[in-house]
Amino acid sequence: MANLEVQEVEFLQKYHELLEGMSEALDHLGEMPDVGESSIAETLFADLVKGMQQLHASHDQLAPLLNVETLDQFDSLVQSMSKWFEQDVDKAALLSNEVIPAFLDWKQDMDDRIEPLIAH
């Protein structure tokens, strides 16, 4: 891969840091015994949605840097996350069966692409 500009490396570092923070938040949500009734869980999930919006907004800049041709995996994750807002959804099951695995798959794919570019 071609040498990246300093700004591009910084962008990738920030994207990577956002993924790390979101991963920690999902871990915390996944461990909450009362995730379906917790106002803290609602706030944390809302923050995750904002993080997803930031990731999405950066994809036009990210895709050419990483030679990403499709964002289907990301779109699938967004669809899973949107189920959180449906009535009568089992939020704990949604997290453990869909959202967390989909996020971890996306994060691993991005980590595999980003980490070699930002390693010093």
Image (cartoon, rainbow, N blue to C red):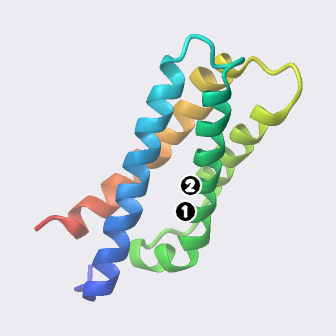
Residue 8 is labelled as: none
Residue 55 is labelled as: 1
Badge 1 amino acid: Leu
79 relative to 116, above or below: above
In the displayed structure image, the side of residue 82 where residue 105 appears, left or right = left
| Front position in the image: 21 or 71 | 21
100 relative to 115, above or below: above
- Disc 1 on helix, strand or loop? helix
Q: Position of residue 67 (x, y in %)?
A: 44, 73
17 relative to 25, above or below: below
- Disc 2 on helix, strand or loop? helix
Q: Position of residue 71 (x, y in %)?
A: 60, 61
**Disc 2 and disc 1 in contact, CB within 8 angstroms:** yes
What residue is at 27 percent from the left and 89 percent from the top?
Answer: 5
Give the spatial CA distance, label 2 vs label 1. 6 Å
Q: Quadrant of the N terminus?
A: bottom left
What residue is at 57 percent from the left and 78 percent from the top?
Answer: 60
| Front position in the image: 35 or 68 | 35
- Tell which residue pokes out farthest to the front in this image: 39
**Residue placed under numbered mark 2 in the picture:** 51
- Tell which residue pokes out farthest to the top in this image: 33
What residue is at 52 percent from the left and 22 percent from the top?
Answer: 30
Which of the 4 quarters of the picture holds residue 13? bottom left
Badge 2 amino acid: Gly
Q: Quadrant of the C terminus?
A: bottom left
